[in-house]
């Protein structure tokens, strides 16, 4: 009724009150599919779906990663009454290298964490970032183990990256392949060759 007739009635009241509002709704779900599968009300979908804007996930917009990080940092510093913090170049590299499965909300939380862990006036370094942001360095930092060849070391890192991408994409292989820049068949071959669970 609010959307269709633009009127409300207060809880416990009987007077009909006209309103003049615009509704902006956001979702990370495919609502048209939800309607087809009877998981979302069709009448509500068509009342909301007047102008639809599709925004790709943050992982597909790498140029937005650092501006968003700086925006959130600025807001949090202002709220906390702190001198504005800056991201060290190494931290910027880690942030742009992460695929952000939690999208903008994950980025916001990451900046709040960095603010809480960084002393006033300091640069935010990779040490202040979540382990999930810097974990790619772990298999690479150790390089080749004494008992393995270069091929084996590369296979170990590649298997780790595929496992991480599968986890971040909910196990969906087609989406994982796209994110990794592979064909689905190419991903299947690598999973088999590398013994990825």
Image (cartoon, helix red, strand yellow):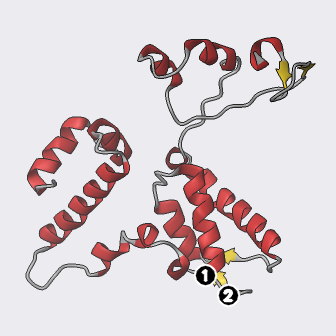
Q: Please state which of residues 127 and 157 is positioned toward the viewer in this rendering.
A: 127
State the image coordinates of residue 5 (x, y, percent, origin top left): 81, 12
Local crowd at mark 1 within 10 Å, few (<14), some, or many (≥20)?
Answer: few
Query: Quarter of the image containing the N terminus?
Result: top right
Please name the residue shown 58% across and 75% down the image.
Answer: 89
Q: Is residue 123 above or below residue 40?
A: below
Local crowd at mark 2 within 10 Å, few (<14), some, or many (≥20)?
Answer: few
What is the secondary structure assignment of the residue under circle 2? Answer: loop
Please name the residue shown 60% across and 81% down the image.
Answer: 117
Q: Are marks 2 and 1 in contact (CB under 8 Å)?
A: no
Residue 190 visible (yes or no)? yes
Question: Picture quarter containing residue 80?
Answer: bottom right
Question: Is 80 situated left or right of 44 in this image?
Answer: right
Q: Please state which of residues 4 and 65 is positioned toward the viewer in this rendering.
A: 4
Query: Which labelled disc corresponds to residue 82?
Result: none
Question: Is 30 situated left or right of 13 in this image?
Answer: left
State the image coordinates of residue 6 (x, y, percent, origin top left): 84, 17
Q: Is residue 4 above or below residue 177?
A: above
Please name the residue shown 26% across and 81% down the image.
Answer: 142
Residue 90 visible (yes or no)? no
How far apart are the alpha carbons under marks 2 and 1? 7 Å
Q: Is residue 77 above or below residue 29?
A: below
Q: In this view, does 21 lie above or below 197?
A: above
State the image coordinates of residue 21 (x, y, percent, origin top left): 86, 26
State the image coordinates of residue 73 (x, y, percent, origin top left): 71, 67
Q: Please state which of residues 22 and 11 is positioned toward the viewer in this rendering.
A: 11
Question: Picture quarter containing residue 84?
Answer: bottom right
Question: What residue is shown with label 1?
Answer: 117
What is the secondary structure assignment of the residue under circle 1? Answer: helix
Query: Which labelled disc corresponds to residue 119?
Result: 2
Please name the residue shown 55% across and 48% down the image.
Answer: 58
């Amino acid at each position: 009724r609010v959307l269709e007739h633009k009127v409300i009635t207060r809880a416990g009241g009987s007077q009909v009150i006209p309103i003049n509002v615009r509704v902006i709704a956001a979702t990370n779900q495919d609502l048209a599919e939800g309607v087809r599968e009877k998981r979302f009300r069709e009448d509500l979908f068509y009342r909301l779906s007047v102008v639809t804007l599709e925004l790709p996930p943050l992982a597909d917009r790498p140029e937005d990663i650092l501006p968003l990080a700086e925006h959130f940092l600025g807001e949090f510093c202002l709220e906390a009454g702190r001198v504005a913090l800056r991201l060290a170049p190494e931290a910027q590299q880690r942030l742009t290298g992460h695929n952000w499965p939690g999208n903008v909300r994950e980025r916001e939380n990451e900046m709040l964490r960095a603010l809480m862990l960084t002393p006033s006036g300091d640069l935010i370094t990779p040490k202040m970032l979540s382990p999930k942001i810097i974990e790619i360095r772990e298999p690479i930092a150790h390089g080749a183990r004494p008992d393995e060849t270069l091929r084996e070391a590369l296979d170990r890192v590649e298997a780790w990256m595929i496992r991480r991408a599968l986890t971040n994409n909910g196990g969906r292989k087609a989406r994982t392949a796209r994110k990794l820049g592979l064909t689905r068949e190419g991903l299947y071959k690598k999973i088999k060759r590398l013994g990825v669970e």
